[in-house]
Amino acid sequence: MKKHILLIALLMGASACNDDFLEKLPQTSISPEVFFNAEGDLKLYINGLLSMPDMGSYLSDQSTDNAATTGAVEMKVIMTGSPSSQTITGGWDWGRLRNVNYFLDNYNKANAAADIKAHYAGIARYYRAQFYLDKVARFSDVPWFSQTLNPGDEDLYKTQDPRTLVMDSVMADLAYAAANVKDAADLVPTGTPGKWAVMTQYARTALYEGTYRKYHPELNLQATANKFLETAATVSAEIMASGKFSIYKTGKPNADYAALFGSQDLSSNPEVILFNAFDQTKDRSQNVNSTVFGDYEQAPARDLVQAYLMKDGSRFTDVQGYQQFGFVKEFQNRDPRLAQTLVYPGWVRAAETAPYILRLNKNFTGYHQLKGYVNSTDNVALNSVDVPVYRYAEVLLTYAEAKAELGTLTQDDLDKSVNLIRARVQMPDLKLAIANGSPDLVMAQKYPNVTGANRGVIFEIRRERRVEFAFENQRFNDVMRWQAGKLLTAIPEGLYFSGLGKYDLTGDGVEDIILIDKSKTIPDEKDKEKNSLGVVLIYYRAGAIGEDVTVYLKNGNAGGTMVTETAARKFEDPKYYYRPIPQKEMLLNPKLKQVFGWN
């Protein structure tokens, strides 16, 4: 056993060092003849490769139109600077692939039944598929390595393989994994990927590549898009037909959705296909409270708020004057998921009795994120919330989107997919004829490349994905695969204020804050004005970006939305859908080639 632990430690240590390019080989640490002997060895190795999203997923929308950030996130840096292969240097690391391939080169040496070996090989190939999907999403063409390479191997310094070859290989890996990975409790401990997790990734990957090829003419692969979309529809339909999963709901439309992201135990939740378990009492803890809420480094954007439908299913952006709605009004009669994703008027923070008053800071939007925030003062509870990795809701939306893109979507398809998700929060059903008969004009502006008879319902499925998976690390890839990068050029905006004066932010009709002119000084506490409840108002000096104020408004003292920055953003199409190969890698391997205008 000590040898086994040593091997995994060496492997994981090597995997953490991403600067080297496949030269530190696992087999230099210990011979495969010593290790790959029995089923226990295979299990130990595969468990050592376990890697799943954690609470950091709730911070992923900083690079999208869902949020603003003061951080130097890569996409914002690219759009506001002069990016090149010397400044954009991440992503070209191969340590994890080396460890996966080493297992696949040696697992057959073990004395174990064929189906057991195939099970573990399937999990390894699932990991390899995930690895390569990330690489393709970033670089498009990349070298495909199906075996562990030794120093001096010629393929260490080959050029990229075509995207078509790589993605066909990825799909072959996922097909093998879907056919061979088991779902028995003794082989798949709680919290590790089994058959249905693998199949969810299979469907996700097929949808990604199918829509990417359809909407990216620079690849010249539109003719091959449908085979991926058909796979996405078929695989998701198989998961649906299994009857093993269902949308989580207990008849509480204002709480059931939020419960998915605040649970101490997701093991019995019927919607959760795979989760990452946390438990402070077992030395496994994590929370992102201070990042999503305290200083709100990721501040939700008003554009996201406006995407949610009204409670009756009508479009918020069809309401007269919606652009001038303040915080309280824009939360009235909306899709219940909005108030389970963001702090709403009247929300009460743990250990407090009065409703929370939004804190306004310059460079931020004023909105506060609830998803990922744990509303508790109990440190054990705070640090022991499970994170859903795959949810059944994604399977249903994958199915609906694939069928819509293929042109085969029916009302029955919507009723067994999108409308099951809407039913959780008691939203009206999505009707195919109505959606296609009256496409959303705001969505049409966002996605001008969507055409055809299903244009309207595709818009609504995209809306559903955005609101259902806000802050769950889905939005960026969705925007990229839909060729909608221009959406990211809009500088995020926040709460709307009509001008200087007093405002209610808790929904009780009593003012909570006051915006004063930039020329005035915030008075001492004893001199501040009180509201009708005898509570001291919170003061902010308002003005334009660059002025000595505490809240930035789009039109300065004349009001408008809160604004976060002024640096103009540009999105070069198709260049910015990809990243450059770091210059140092080009120097090490002259056979590598930059694509789509990078240098």
Image (tube, rainbow, N blue to C red):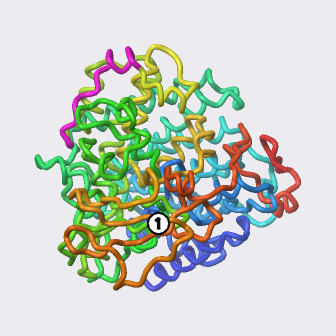
Q: Which residues are magenta?
A: 424-438
Residue closest to the eye, 128 or 334 = 334
User: Where the N terminus falls, by quadrant?
Assistant: bottom left
Residue at the disc numbered 1? 516
Q: Quadrant of residue 283?
A: bottom left
Which residue is at a point 42% across and 21% down the rendered structure image? 439
How far across and down, in percent of the image, does residue 222 sit? 62, 24
Magenta-span inclusion, residue 73? no
- Badge 1 crowding class, 10 Å Cα cut-off, few under 14, some 14 to 19, many 20 or more, is many
Q: Is residue 436 left or right of residue 413?
A: right
Query: Is the residue 156 above or below the residue 12 in the image?
Result: above
Residue 297 can be seen in this image: yes
Q: Residue at x 53, y 40 (%)?
A: 172
In the rendering, at what x and y percent does residue 462 appear?
A: 43, 34
Residue 62 drawn at (x, y percent): 53, 57
Q: Secondary structure at mark 1?
A: strand
Q: Is residue 118 above or below residue 96?
A: above
In this view of the protein, can residue 46 be seen by the observer? no
**424 left or right of 29?**
left
Amino acid found under the numbered disc labelled 1:
Ile
**Nearer to us in this view, 562 or 488:** 562
Q: Residue at x 49, y 41 (%)?
A: 205
